[in-house]
Amino acid sequence: MHKEEIYRVRFPYREDMVIQGFRFGKGDPTACILGAIRGNEIQQMYICSQLIRELKELEMNGCINAGKSILVIPVVNSIGLNLDRRFFGVEDVDINRDFPGRNDGDTTDRIAFEIFDRVKEYTYGIQLTSFYMTGEFVPHVRMMETGYQNTSLANLFGLPYVVVRKPSPLDTKTLNYNWQDEMTAAFSLYTNRNDTIDDESAVQALSAVLRFLTRMGIIRYESHSGFISHIIMEDDLTDVYVSKGGIFRGLVKPGEYVRYGYPIAEIRDPYEGFIKEAIIAPTSGIVFFAHTEALITQGEMAYRLIHRLHQ
């Protein structure tokens, strides 16, 4: 293992923010795995730390194939992690909306530029990331529909679902999109937690990454076969919104099967405790995403459902 400095952000009144990378094997830039770009992505940082531990042992045992190089960057926004803030700096800038960056721009532009300059030559790119809304997912792999996406490769992670998303103009500034623009096979991997550690889904994500690296001939590792993934277009998911705000009491969790017309959540009045709204399943299917905060605002998404899938 070779530990290297990817980029250093210098601050006049506190210690520097150093973005570190861990390189395994020698040869062509084959696979890059990137963790916490945002300051609340504790789970993503944890998964990368476990991956580094596994790869270190595999390298010591000669199990990284010749001519292959793996780079793991576990944390980008360490300042955000230390301050318990999701975004960077006093401006609250999302670094994952600044790619490919500029070397003559502001701080987040330069961070994105330096990171992308290091990772854009890799054949495969895996980002452990989080959703823009608070909640829990069924673990899955997500890809942008850029014309370069390859769902067959995404199946090799062995996770339950592969979601293909049509990019919006905002998505063109993400790492995933710009990786694909440089002809890197890019994948975003989501687990069911962000700001806390969930060992079960962390192990599932770690196994998925090691499974993919094994199947692509990068490492030699004994892994279980995993799932046969369902390919889903994000536009085909059914979004369930609430019409009233209040205390959110969810009745179902990600991965559960729900039936059309059955209650899946309640919105309670925060002062008097009565049920302001009963949320009813608009279709039969699998809960893909669930709101998990104690409070919910009017018009907010409570669930995303995969319809017409049966156990």
Image: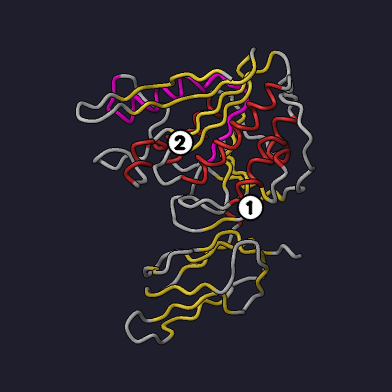
Relative horizontal placement of residue 16, taking residue 34 as reference (left or right):
left
Residue 86 counted in the magenta span: no
Residue type beneath disc 2: Thr
Q: Residue at x 37, y 75 (%)?
A: 246
Q: Residue at x 28, y 24 (%)?
A: 10
What x and y, as percent, mark residue 47?
Answer: 57, 41
Residue 300 falls in image quadrant: bottom left
The mark that comes first in sequence, 1 or 2, is 2
Q: Which mark is residue 219?
A: none
102 lies above or below 95: above
Callout 1: few (<14), some (14-19), or many (20+) C-alpha neighbours within 10 Å? few
What x and y, as percent, mark residue 74?
Answer: 50, 33
Q: Quadrant of the N terminus?
A: top right
The residue that disc 2 covers is: 174
Callout 2: few (<14), some (14-19), or many (20+) C-alpha neighbours within 10 Å? some
What x and y, as percent, mark residue 205?
Answer: 63, 44
The residue that disc 1 covers is: 200
253 lies above or below 43: below
> Which one is in front in this view, the residue at disc 1 or the one at disc 2?
1
Q: Quadrant of the C terminus?
A: bottom right
Is disc 2 placed on a helix, strand or loop? Answer: loop
Relative horizontal placement of residue 125, taking residue 170 as reference (left or right):
right
What x and y, as percent, mark residue 65?
Answer: 73, 19
Bounds of the magenta span? Answer: 104-128
Please tell me which residue lies in front, 33 or 199. Answer: 199
Is disc 1 placed on a helix, strand or loop? Answer: helix
Which residue is most to the left?
13
Q: Residue at x 49, y 24 (%)?
A: 21
Residue type beneath disc 1: Glu
223 lies above or below 133: above
